[in-house]
Amino acid sequence: MGPAPDAPEGTDPDRADGPTTREDTVSPRRLNRLVGSSAFANLGDGIAKVAFPLLAVQVTQDPLLIAGLSAAQFLPWLLFGVLAGTLLDRVDRRAAVVVANTVRAAVVGLLALLVHLDATSIWLVYVAALLVGTAETVADSATNVLIPSVVERSGLAGANSKLQAAEIVGQTFLGGPVGSLTFAVFAAFPFLIDSVAFALGAVLLAALPGNYRPERDRADLTSATAGVRADIVRGLRWVRGHPVMGRLVLVVGLVSLVSEMAQAQLVLYAIKDLGLSEAAFGVFGFAGGIGGLLGAAVASRLIDRLGNTATLTLSLVTSGAAFLAMGLVKVPVLSGALFGLFAAAVVVVNVLLATARHTLVPEELLGRVIGVWRTVAWGALPVGALLGGATTRVLGSASATFVLSGAGLLLVALVAWGAVRAHDLTPARHS
């Protein structure tokens, strides 16, 4: 499909009167609105990840209930990831983001009021976390699914890099510090800011004209009459039957599992093995954020220069080597730099796989495939965390777990190379 035709002089290139086609919706301005909406939503996510645990500690001292909050925030991805993706193959995806972000704004806004009135309990915090997390499965997936609708095929890698950068800045550099600092002023403050951030994310996309409901083919129309279950089954069958997509889902699951083994032990590694203070531990988050931004900046150029297979393999080898080296060194500055290198390599992998997904998957199936993808990726995280904890206990140090995780990522790189080397991850699409 060629580039979108230039708008006639004196017209608004983003104006859409009546039915729209992909050519009508592709424009840099639309991409900027999508990335801007994602930036505000990720700021809200970053604030929520800090403010919810702080609120939990304020209302209860039960360590089991506090730990359960993490599960409550994560659980919606396991329960609703595929279902949310199926929904996105049936509705206007722009409208889905708007509704989901509006729901998140309303929930955290109401929570802010309850905190101000001192009317909260740990169970209300749980309910709010579950609602926000469920809406997040729709908003995040829909934002990703919208990318091919607002950018030309040649710009997919660059667009995915921008989304990765927006996530890193919003969640790592801004959300965490804003959440903790404002909570220290008064407990309701971060939830007020959170509500505004989600609302702004909704408003930016609400002003985006056009129809972003996918065109469903004959098979999809048939399955639609049978209900959501048939849609889910067709999506799963498509992933399983595709020559490379199922392999990529396996690769991303392995990367999540093996890397989380070490990442879940990062605090023990920093404090016990490196002897850092709790305050100095924050340097690792900063280094990871810097590395992630660098990875987002170079990802599209690496893919263009090296190709998909080489970039994927090299990035996984780099991430594995970084963790392996972290387990062998005891120098905090070097360890921080290595963690930044790991983050950069993982972001390159994320950009490459997201671009391949946008290119390989038919538009009418993209929501379901992303739902399957994220369920596998997120589902592997708690398994990896538990394995990492068990490994540290058995081997006696977090450093040993980093060595094992790094070696595992090197094996995953070999698996990924074998999985994709015979396949074109960016085949040409025909109009």
Image (tube, rainbow, N blue to C red):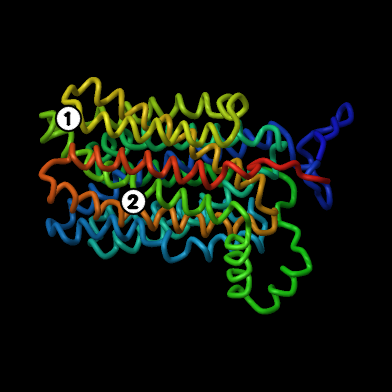
Reading the image, the residue beneath label 1 is 279
Amino acid beneath label 1: Ala
x and y, in percent, of residue 353 in the image: 54, 42
Horizontally, is 126 left or right of 373 in the view?
left
Label 1 SS: helix
- Which quadrant holds residue 265? top left
Horizontally, is 274 left or right of 194 in the view?
left
> Few, some or many C-alpha atoms within 10 Å of disc 2 (few <14, some 14-19, many ≥20)?
many
Relative vertical location of residue 288 with respect to residue 391 in this rendering, above or below: above
User: Which residue of the protein is positioned furthest toward the bottom in this rendering?
Assistant: 226
Horizontally, is 281 left or right of 27 in the view?
left
Amino acid beneath label 2: Ala
Number of the label disc, if any, that sits on residue 231: none
Pointer 2 or 1: first along the chain: 2
Relative vertical location of residue 367 with respect to residue 410 in this rendering, above or below: below
Reading the image, the residue beneath label 2 is 112
x and y, in percent, of residue 301 in the image: 58, 24
Identity of the residue drawn at 43% across and 36% down: 316
x and y, in percent, of residue 238 in the image: 63, 62
Label 2 SS: helix
